[in-house]
Amino acid sequence: MLFARLTSRWALGWLAAALGVPLLLATALTTAGALTP
């Protein structure tokens, strides 16, 4: 039970990282492009 919950939390964290990192990178690139004259 505990192991299943831990695995589920780890999978959720991995999924959030996989989705969040490219989004954060795209936001940073867009901001840098907007600030660059």
Image (cartoon, rainbow, N blue to C red):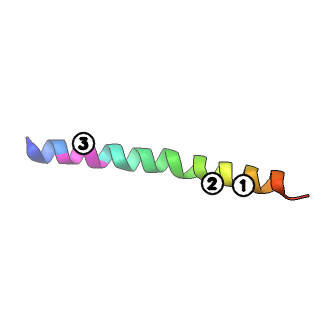
Instruction: Report, in whole angstroms, how far the alpha carbon at label 1 lies from the one at label 3.
Output: 32 Å
Give the residue at mark 1: 29
- As helix, strand or loop, the secondary structure at mark 3 comes to helix
Residue 36 at x, y percent in the picture: 86, 59
Q: Secondary structure at mark 1?
A: helix
Mark 2 nearby-residue class (10 Å; few <14, some 14–19, many ≥20): few
The stretch in magenta equals: 6-10
Pointer 1 or 3: first along the chain: 3
User: Foreground mark, 2 or 3?
Assistant: 2
In the picture, measured across the screen, residue 1 lies left or right of residue 6, that is left
- Distance from disc 2 to disc 3, alpha carbons, whole Å, reads 26 Å
Residue denoted by label 3: 8
The amino acid marked with disc number 1 is Leu
Instruction: Name the residue type under label 3.
Output: Ser
Dot 1, crowdedness within 10 Å: few (<14), some or many (≥20)? few
Q: Earlier in the sequence, mark 2 or mark 3?
A: 3
Q: Residue at x 28, y 49 (%)?
A: 10
Look at discs 1 and 3 and give the one toward the viewer.
1
Which residue is tagged 2? 25
Q: Residues within 10 Å of mark 3 (few under 14, many from 20)?
A: few
Q: Position of residue 23 (x, y in %)?
A: 59, 46
In the rendered view, tell whether residue 13 sits above or below residue 37.
Answer: above
Quarter of the figure that contains the C terminus: bottom right
Q: Residue furthest left?
A: 1
Q: Are marks 1 and 2 in contact (CB under 8 Å)?
A: yes
Count of numbered marks: 3
Disc 1 to disc 2, C-alpha distance: 6 Å
Q: Residue at 31% of width from left, 46% of height from top?
A: 11
Q: Residue placed at 22% from the left, 47% from the top?
A: 7
